[in-house]
Image (cartoon, coloured by chain):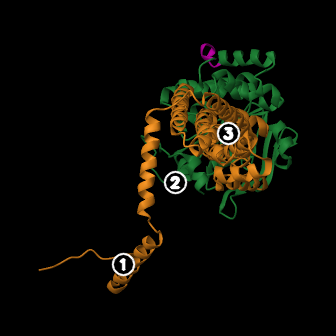
Chain colours: A orange, B green
Amino acid sequence: MRTWQRPHYLVPNKRWRLALWVMFIAYLVVGIGSVEVNWMRAYEGLDRGAKFLAGFLQPDFTSRAKDIYAGILESLTMTVTSTVVGILLSLPFGVGAARNISPKPVYLFCRSFIALSRSMQEIIVAIFLVALFGFGAFAGFLTLTYATIGFLGKLLAEEIEGIDRKQLEAISATGASWLQRVHMAIWPQVMPRMIGLSFYRFDINFRESAVIGIVGAGGIGATLNTAIDRYEYDSAGAILLIIIVIVMACEYLSGWIRKWVS
Amino acid sequence: MLKLEHLKKRYKTGPWVLKDISFEVPEGEIVGLIGPSGAGKSTLIRCINRLIEPSEGNIYLADACLSKLSTSQMRTQRRKIGMIFQEYALVERLSVMENVLSGRLGYLPFWRSFLRKFPSNDIDNAFEYLDRVGLIDHANKRADELSGGQRQRVGIARALAQDPRLLLVDEPTASLDPKTSRQIMRLIQSICRENGLPAIINIHDVPLAQQFVDRIIGLQGGEVVFDGKPDELTEDVLTRIYGDEDWHPEPQDDADELEQVEVA
């Protein structure tokens, strides 16, 4: 009678396996113990959560209507301007960061800038820029522009690196200059996706504008933060509902435009 | 007209892809370049317009030494060298007309192509070339709406738009059916005859080459092993070029050459 057991590839030694399990469980126990779960606070939190939910279910659009309107307008302004400026600036960075068409020094510079832009979360950038330029929409605009360059620049560069090289070769063979090659051979190949990504980034920028407002970078986020600080959960609920509706509208619109372009 | 002197090419430190190639192409002569996959045919014609940089040797077109020119000087020479590609290499998302007009890029400043403000003379000629290749009704279609044969005709019109002194043709019929292949070859041949244009045509299909070219150069392992009239291409010569094979009733069918070159 032959028997078979699945061999343990990861840790072949049985004692080591046992020791690792014991260490893992001990760490888990100590770790959870150090969190100091305060059940009293959890209970109070539930209570506040219920109040919040109640406010959410009976949203109050009217009593803070002026603040909400101003916040939404500021957020939309921030979103539109930062998306447009971000797209324009991401073009040179994206082209520069495409290995197949840019010289090595330019490539390295653009890649590092994009990597730097992508390595920092919007909130951290926003905190930094608010400290530099003070509260308000200007810091928010800069934050979102910076993030947009990193996002679109990277995706554009990857798109350019994946183009059909034969088309580029054919345009080069006509004696076209570098700019003409980029415009006639590369741009037509990457344009539809670039348009889709730009609208996608518009979505993201609107959502982010609500988040970075909480750290002082203006927009609807600031209004939301104030409402929560004042325990006006019904107004906060109204703001959240408006954000959800606008994001969904953007999503639908960008999907429709992407379909239309391709 | 075109003269190659001791042309050699190797990629980085790899083996020599082209070993000492020398030949001349006089005005108006159509040369068929045949040889097995990886013989260096694609590399050879790309060395002429320096889409691939030659390692050693000289290439002369009329009075200009192409292999010695700077990048910007080479651009003005490239305008004079029309190129037709294996898989047409049209810019798929541009219209047929834009593809034909892209043959003018070397003559135009950036702002003109950027704003699509092509000189009316160029537009006039472009319509004429489209008429010549039989696609006058398709000017505003997108290139990816056309069939293979039609796309290759656009490729030919684009090369014509350059007002070339020389045509480089890389496997023009490799993705076309036998009938369309003959039509395309006939079109290239008659265009060369009309304008007294010399051409170098890479081609796998030996009978097709014999039917349409004036002279055949056989390439094997990066060396010229045959140079003569199409009717001198005997079974012995074919064996010298391609290696031992029963040449009747079917000629050998080769795989895509360009890929082989790039791997090498």
Three-letter code for the amino acid on which mark 3 is drawn = Leu
Image x and y of residue A48, in percent:
46, 48
What is the spatial separation of the Cα atoms under label 3 and label 2, in whole angstroms?
35 Å
Depicted B67 relative to depicted B153: above or below? below
Tell which of B26 and A234 is nearer to you.
A234
Q: Are marks 3 and 2 in contact (CB under 8 Å)?
A: no
Q: Which chain carries label 2?
A: B
Circle 3: element type: helix
Report if residue B153 lies within the magenta region: no
Report if residue B134 lies within the magenta region: yes
Image quadrant containing the C terminus of chain B? bottom right
Task: Provide the residue designation for mark 3.
Answer: A168
Task: Provide the residue designation for mark 2.
Answer: B243
Tell which of B222 and A140 is nearer to you.
A140
Tell which of B183 and B152 is nearer to you.
B152
Residue at left 76%, top 34%?
A180
Three-letter code for the amino acid on which mark 1 is drawn = Trp
Query: Seen in the image, is B110 located left or right of residue A187?
Result: right
Magenta stretch, residue numbers: B133-139
Task: Provide the residue designation for mark 1.
Answer: A21
Depicted A125 relative to depicted A33: above or below? above
